[in-house]
Image (cartoon, rainbow, N blue to C red):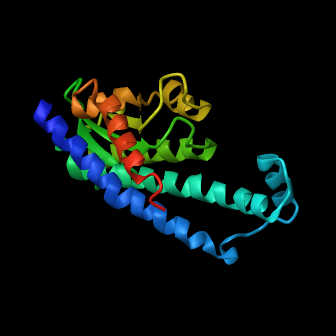
Amino acid sequence: MTKAERKRILEQVKEWFRTVIVPNHLKNTQKLVSASAFDVNPFLAPYLAAFLTGELSPESVAKALLYPRVLGTSITTSFGTNMQKFISDVLKNSFGSMVRGIDIEFVDAVDGRRKYCQVKLGPNTINRDDVETIHQHFKDARNLGRTNNVKVAHGDLVVAILYGEPGQESGHYKRLRDELDYPLFIGQEFWYRLTGDKNFYAELRQAIAEVAIEARGAA
């Protein structure tokens, strides 16, 4: 990747975050003005309010209800889904896959081989049942390759984790790697294999952080 290409992609990341992630987050947050948006647990809400703020008041209960919604899983889920689409739309050596259970395909910048990839957001984002589901999807992909006379090597079926460091992955990811022998590309390694640029992961994080500062107080 040339310096100009890297700059172009990082600018596209910023624009994508501004126009997709931030507006969706604000839209979902604005829905929370009505009490009907909450399924209030009358047993836990007072406890959580007091635990969070040290007092029990209408304001503390409101904070206990709002903060998890505003900062919680909805933006995390949408970010992962939209980042997957961004990768396939913007990075020239990757594209969305037509194979069931495969999120993207890309040419590995390290070994030059085509990788069939499931994309996951972070190092603790799958459960025990997901391991078998991923394994079955990968077996189906190999079988489809045989049917279509396309050789898909076991080592070319990979799980990519968008952020994190080696050693942070959960036991479920370790099972995929250690027992089922599927490569895990975690954080910096994934982005390096995707782009061929060892510094891209750090620069990507910086680009998103810059837009996050822009968005501060936008609500």
Name the residue nearer the viewer: 132 or 71. Answer: 71
Image position, residue 100 (x, y; %): 37, 55
Instruction: Kindly identify the residue that appears in the image at 85 percent across and 52 percent down.
Output: 55
Instruction: Kindly identify the residue that appears in the image at 37 percent across and 36 percent down.
Output: 205
Q: Is residue 30 above or below residue 17?
A: below
102 relative position to 178: left or right: left
Instruction: Kindly identify the residue that appears in the image at 32 percent across and 60 percent down.
Output: 19
Please give the count of numbered marks on the rendered protein: 0
Name the residue nearer the viewer: 177 or 188. Answer: 188
- Tell me, yes or no, if residue 147 can be seen here: no
Q: Quadrant of residue 46?
A: bottom right
Q: Is residue 195 above or below residue 40?
A: above
- Tell me, yes or no, if residue 191 can be seen here: yes
Specify the farthest residue to the right: 43
Image position, residue 38 (x, y; %): 69, 70
Q: Quadrant of residue 108?
A: top left
Name the residue nearer the viewer: 158 or 163. Answer: 163
Instruction: Kindly identify the residue that appears in the image at 39 percent across and 40 percent down.
Output: 209
Q: Is residue 178 above or below residue 206?
A: above
Image position, residue 99 (x, y; %): 32, 53
Image position, residue 24 (x, y; %): 43, 64
Figure quadrant of the N terminus: top left
